[in-house]
Image (cartoon, helix red, strand yellow):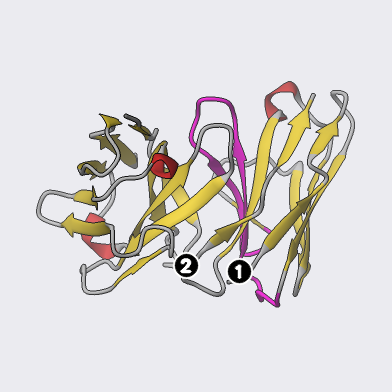
């Protein structure tokens, strides 16, 4: 069965960096685009970034553009999110998500999420 | 950016009753509309995609409908496990993919 397992969250100070990981299993990782979606405490869902199946195209939400970098290692079946210049407002649970079998950008599977807290 | 607006914000229902959740897009999104349910402390779960196609394992008491900019998720015969926050999401025009603000269903 499909599994997505995020890791790397924690408490960091504003301005610092952190990298999240998402280990995938149960499907052919290299065939699908992958996304990061976040959820601030008590708030709704916010899309963060997408990377194409081959890593050649990447798109970001305006709120993170220029600070976050999405990447993937298909040989390791792992998705990453490098987060630089972190701000208080980046505090959230970060989910990785797999697109649907059709390739459309709805999210068929989600990880359990990893919590990032940005605080001094 | 396509804005998604959900109503009502909160819906209180009794077991066995039906519920109707609404989602409006700021522009035509074709059939690129999905619904999710999220329970406290959990990741969202895909319920519906393509306006009306139920995801694997989703019971047929969940029905999605609509077109263009107006969409509805209808839940018939609500069960206790149906409580949670329901989100709609458009994937027609991206980036960014956008979500509605959610409807909390209290059983």
Q: Which mark is residue A109?
A: none
The chain to which mark 1 is attached is B
Task: Classify mark 2: residues with Cα within 10 Å, few (<14), some (14-19) or many (20+).
Answer: some
Q: Quadrant of residue A20?
A: top left
Query: In the current view of this chain or complex, which residue is farthest to the left?
Result: A75
Q: How far is disc 2 from disc 1 in space, using C-alphas? A: 8 Å
Q: Position of residue B91 (x, y in %)?
A: 54, 67
Query: In the current view of this chain or complex, which residue is farthest to the front?
Result: A120
Labels 2 and 1 in the same subunit: no
> Looking at the rendering, in which quadrant would you find the N terminus of chain B?
bottom right
Q: Which mark is residue A104?
A: 2
Q: Quadrant of residue A57?
A: bottom left
Q: Quadrant of residue A48?
A: bottom left
Label 1 sits on residue: B32
> Looking at the rendering, in which quadrant would you find the C terminus of chain B?
top right
The chain to which mark 2 is attached is A
Q: Position of residue A72 (x, y in %)?
A: 19, 57
Q: Is residue A92 highlighted in magenta?
A: no
Q: Left or right: where does residue B52 sit relative to residue A86?
A: right
Q: Left or right: where does residue A112 sit relative to residue B54?
A: left
Residue in view at x 89 percent, y 31 percent: B17
Q: Position of residue B14 (x, y in %)?
A: 88, 24
Mark 1 residue element: loop
Judge by depth and name the residue closer to the eye, B26 or A108.
B26
Q: Badges 2 and 1: C-beta atoms under 8 Å apart?
A: yes
Task: Classify mark 1: residues with Cα within 10 Å, few (<14), some (14-19) or many (20+).
Answer: some
Residue in view at x 50 percent, y 29 percent: B42
Q: Left or right: where does residue B56 sit relative to residue A2?
A: right
What's drawn in magenta, residue-wise?
B27-52
């Amino acid at each position: 069965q499909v599994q997505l397992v995020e890791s790397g969250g924690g408490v960091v100070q504003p301005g610092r960096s952190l990298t999240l990981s998402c280990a995938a299993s149960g499907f052919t990782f290299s065939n699908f685009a992958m996304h990061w979606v976040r959820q601030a405490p008590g708030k709704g869902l916010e899309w963060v970034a997408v990377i194409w199946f081959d890593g050649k195209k990447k798109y970001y939400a305006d709120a993170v553009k220029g600070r976050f970098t999405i990447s993937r290692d298909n040989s390791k079946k792992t998705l990453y999110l490098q987060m630089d210049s972190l701000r208080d407002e980046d505090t959230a649970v970060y989910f990785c998500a797999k697109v649907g079998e059709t390739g459309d950008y709805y999210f068929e599977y989600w990880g359990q999420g990893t919590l990032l807290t940005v605080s001094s | 950016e396509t804005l998604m607006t959900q109503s009502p914000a909160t819906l209180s229902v009794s077991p066995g009753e039906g519920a109707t959740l609404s989602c409006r897009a700021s522009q035509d999104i074709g059939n690129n509309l999905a619904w999710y349910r999220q329970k406290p402390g959990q990741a969202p779960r895909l319920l519906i995609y393509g306006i009306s196609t139920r995801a694997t394992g989703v019971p047929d008491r969940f029905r999605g409908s609509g077109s263009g900019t107006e969409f509805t998720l209808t839940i018939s015969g609500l069960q206790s496990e149906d409580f949670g926050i329901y989100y709609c999401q458009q994937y027609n025009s991206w980036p960014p993919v956008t979500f509605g603000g959610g409807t909390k269903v209290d059983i």
